[in-house]
Amino acid sequence: MALVRISRRLGLEPELTRVNRLTEPFDLAQFDLALLGSGELAVMPEIIDALTLKLDDFSAFVAAGKGLLVTGNSGGLVAQSTSRLDGRQLKGLGLLDMTVEERTDIYGDDLTIEVDGLELSGIQIRQTDCRLGPAQAAFGEVVYGLGNSADQIDEGARHQNLIFSHLLGPMLVKNPWFTAHYIKTVMTTQQPDLELSWPTSQTWEFERLAAQAIDQFNDDKTIPEGVLRQAKLSLPPADD
């Protein structure tokens, strides 16, 4: 819904396709942006098996600069591998130089990160930690919350317009300035001369006030061990 709403704000008319079952056919090449929302680790083997059949399609999709947004446990789908607590190793698509490890406990809290000077806030419900390879770029840096693993300031991973983050689906709803920037980046990569309309200064006022309230709340609470709290950033300019 956020992608549709904000695409329309930019003057685009999006066509949304949902793939609800592993048996449903889809042609990835027909799309500009794809979202893999978070899911349960228990079903990852079946999903990986299905997506591996389209590995070449996913590799070409990312190489073309199209948008692939992956959140939560689904990071294991695009990682090199996922290690389960029972000793099982799940091989991912390998689109990111990242390994994923199941946690002994589940962690949940707010998460605020800096990405290209923008502050993004949301929630994380963590069943996994991850480690990035030496050349793998992070998606952002933690302002408040748990990074890729305990005491790490790095959060998520990024390669071209493939983004992985522990911020769950509300990332698109609660940070419309990022969503608009991401859509614009993906679309102008495909069509460099594309002209998009841009929201007015008051468009995201509700979301700005919400982000300020979250910052204040997290400033005043006691944080658990391993959680980082850095200096707050400014929210993006009204017309940016």
Image (tube, grey):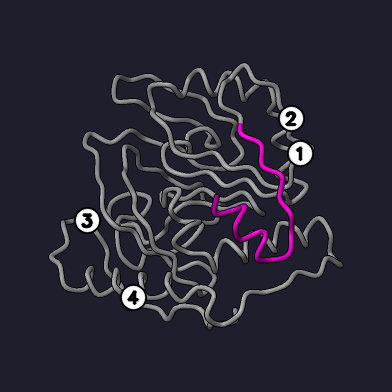
Residue ID at (54%, 70%): 116
Mark 3 to mark 1: distance in Å?
38 Å
Give the residues in magenta.
1-18
Q: Is residue 9 magenta?
A: yes
Q: Which amino acid, by three-letter code, is at mark 1?
A: Ala
Quarter of the C terminus within the rendering: bottom right
Name the disc covering residue 60, or none.
1
Q: Is residue 230 above or below residue 38?
A: below
Instruction: Identify the element where label 4 is drawn.
Output: helix
Cβ atoms at labels 3 and 2 below 8 Å apart: no
> Which of the two labelled residues, at mark 4 and mark 2, occupies the earlier sequence position?
2
> Which of the two labelled residues, at mark 1 and mark 4, occupies the earlier sequence position?
1
Q: Is residue 213 magenta?
A: no
Instruction: Characterize the local packing of mark 2: few (<14), some (14-19) or many (20 or more) Cα atoms within 10 angstroms.
Output: few
Which residue is label 3 attached to? 226
Which residue is label 4 attached to? 212
Instruction: Identify the element where label 1 is drawn.
Output: helix
In front: mark 4 or mark 3?
4
> Which of the two labelled residues, at mark 4 and mark 3, occupies the earlier sequence position?
4
Figure quadrant of residue 104: top left
Mark 1 to mark 4: distance in Å?
39 Å
Figure quadrant of residue 146: bottom left
Which residue is label 2 attached to? 56
Residue ID at (46%, 38%): 99
> Residue 81: x, y in percent?
48, 30
Mark 4 to mark 3: distance in Å?
23 Å
Residue ID at (61%, 39%): 95
